Image (tube, coloured by chain):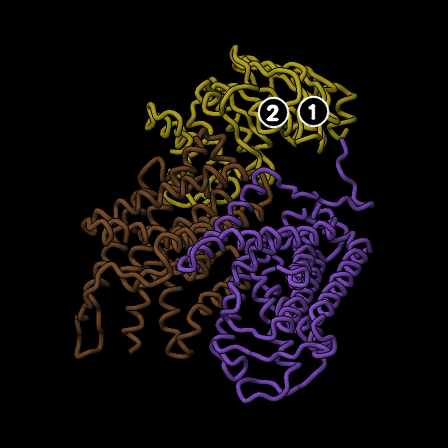
Chain colours: A yellow, B purple, C brown
Amino acid sequence: MLRINDIYSGYGEIEIIHGITLNVEQGEIVSIVGPNGSGKSTLLKSIFSLVDIMGGEINYLGSDLTKAATDQMIKKGLSFVPQTDNIFPTLTVAENLELGAYVSRKNLSDRFDLIYNLFPPLVEKRKKKAGTLSGGQRQMVAFGRALVMEPKLLLLDEPTAGLAPMFIDLILEKVEEINKTGVSILMVEQNAKKALAMSDRGYVLAAGEKKYEDSGRGLLENKEVAQLFLGG
Amino acid sequence: MTFAGVFSYLVFFLIFAGIYAVMTLALNMQRGFAGLFNIGIAGFWAVGAYTSAIMTKGPSPDHLGGFGMPFIIGLLAAGIISSLLAFLVGIPTIRLREDYLGIATIGIAEIIRLVIKNEAWLTNGVRGISAIPKPLAGSFGSNYNLFFLMIVVLVIALFYYLSEKGINSPWGRILRAIREDEEVVKAVGKNVVRYRMEAFVLGAFMMGVGGGLYAHFTSFISPEAFKPMQATFLVWIMLIIGGSANNFGSIVGAFLTWGIWTGTEFLTGMLPAAYTTQAAAIRVILIGVFLEIILLNRPEGLFGEKKYSSVSTADR
Amino acid sequence: MALQLFLNGVILGSIIALGAIGLSLIYGILKFGHFAHGDLMTLGAYFAFLFKVQLGLPFWLAFVLAAALTAGAAILLNLILYRHLKKRDSVIVMISSVGAALIIRNLVLLFWGPQNKFYEKAIQMPIVLGDGLLRIKENQIIILVLALTLVIAVHLFLSKTKLGKAMRAMSDNIDLAQITGINTERVIIWTWAMSGVLTAAAGILLAFDTHLTPVMGWNLLLPLFAAVILGGIGSPYGAMFGGLVIGISQEMSTLIISAAYKPAVAFTIMILMLIIKPSGLMGKKV
């Protein structure tokens, strides 16, 4: 459903991604792993045109994303959870979720039910300002906001960054749960082993280039990858 | 107009433009080199003017005075008191985002205006201070203004020299590095706030001296003598036209802008005398529109940002 | 005496609050201090003067027309200036707003002259309460009622409507708002419109309480910023609260210091806040 073809991108005059090709198929979980500064996040942001695209094309369900407006992407079922600053801190949890439905308000209450079912702790925090929640709960709000948009493909930028260990597994479990409801996932993750273990396929990036691509298991079992990128 | 008349007008014009050039050099130190947002220039100007006036005058029943110090000491005191004020304003604001300093400088300028207006024992209140001594008054006869112009030029030259020297020193390099990337400078363990504060205080010193020059030249100052926001604004236009972080551009910008500002006076001078208020308003509107056009169309000013040798710039 | 000053403070405070709401939202969303805000206030007051006194329209109609025109002026400033300077250093945008402030003030001077002006000539006898303990003019009651009505309207707008929530969301986190599909350009225009309306209202109420002068708004700029910083930049509710605190402190301060130094009170509170908690009372934690 998503095809990135030989993309070059970065900030202003600084090119970070040097020609990467990648694809995500319907129903898949795909992980992008690699060391710090390898361009993982930049690659993800390129899809949403949050960085400058210098070359290549990004095709999603038959249309070119490099030329699409944000609300068009959202209507086509694409949503993005940034790594940091991914909630509206002075708005309540309910308002955060509601804003997820800014573009389309169809079946809103069903969509809310789905999210409160997925993240039960949010129910009693509905009226609380999102900024007052714990790190794990904030991440739930961030997921919730993205899921209200009814995405077909969810882009996650390091969903477990900065979380306490107990929350890391919980959030990754939730990612699998979301995937089971039919949402395809493309995520960048620092916990490479955990991410690859749950992924259908994975890509290993280094210095803005694609070094390896294989099934999740294949990458985990690849000795070279293990030695160079997964810490032995 | 006779040749002598034109010449004496020209000298008069150059003195005022020169005092503004001192202010622009000062603002360039704060804004151009350190990125600081000072829109209370008039406050530092006034503090300098009043300090030097009070320090140099003989005893007066109307206000604090009687120190009878020489002109040079008056100017130095003007600079020092003005820097002290900058230091005090800087303590709570300089570590914060640049706009806080801007708001605080407006506040301090307003408070200074209130003090000058209300503390008559110190400043003679709204009646102002008159008969401020001119250095070596009476020594040059009808050429006195020419002599004063030399003093102004000397001050400009001195500040220009010190400013260039400072900005090319290790201190200046760090200052410029802070503007390029604050985090990197912090990471190597430099106290960013200190460098900013030093630039702010140095700039305020120059502004104080500029204010002193103004007081001695006009020999009369009062809270209503000039419109504070207008004066501050003119200095900003001068800096922007000259190009940020460019000392030479600052000076040229000051003379050019003062020329344009004086030009608008000729223009509105053609209106009948009954329309003086309107004429003044039209002048400000014209110069305001002029600034907006520059900001929108030539953001880098006429001379651009000067490239100093050690700063790595994107040549790509 | 203290009670009277408190009441005067509440009146001034509600006027500051009205102006500060828009200033805070613009500050939060567009990330720059809008130094022409005080002069927009002046402009609103003079527009109302034009309609009420010069054209003889009823007060309420003059109020509505002036608010609409001021909103238009605010949108116009955004359209010709701030929108184009968005990608630049915030100091450039702010100095451009200082320029706009001077232009507006001098346009007011040009069209209406420097003399004080009044909405009505007749002098009102204050209503005396509790054996002369408290004096309040009929106009001041109207000011309080109108200010309260507007604040409630703003609250309902911000908390109940999609547009209002989008404004708050943008003030919180504009990048996230963008990827949530909020049409940020459109919301920015509406924010200017709302600020224009509230600012005009503040100016009109101030002139209604005292009189009109071309510097009325500029003189209130510092208290406006103090209210915004006290409440936390970007927080409309903080701005309302901050406005009241600043208004009341300014009036009550005359118990201790000379009335001439009233404007210094706002400044002092602002500086104290910057020392203790720069993010303000209700601002987001950075």
Judging from the image, mark 1 belongs to the subunit labelled A
Asked whether residue C227 appears in the rendered view, the answer is: no
Q: Amino acid at mark 1?
A: Ile
Using the image as rendered, state which of residue A54 and residue C19 is in the foreground: C19
Image coords of residue B173 (percent x, y): 78, 52
Classify B114 as above or below C276: below
Asked whether residue A42 appears in the rendered view, the answer is: yes
Quote the CA–CA distance across marks 1 and 2: 9 Å
Residue at x 75%, y 66% (from the top left corner): B150
Q: Secondary structure at mark 2?
A: helix
> Disc number at residue A46?
2
Residue at x 27%, y 61% (from the top left corner): C118
Q: Are marks 1 and 2 on the same chain?
A: yes
Q: Amino acid at mark 2?
A: Ser
> Disc number at residue A17?
1
Image coords of residue B263 (percent x, y): 57, 52
Residue at x 68%, y 60% (from the top left corner): B3
Q: Are marks 1 and 2 in contact (CB under 8 Å)?
A: yes
Q: Quadrant of residue B73?
A: bottom right
Q: Is residue A39 left or right of residue C115?
A: right
Using the image as rendered, state which of residue C279 and residue B29 is in the foreground: B29
Q: Secondary structure at mark 1?
A: strand
The N terminus of chain A sits in image quarter: top right
Image coords of residue A119 (percent x, y): 44, 33
Q: Is residue B41 left or right of residue B73?
A: left
**Label 2 neighbour load within 10 Å: few <14, some 14-19, many 20+:** many
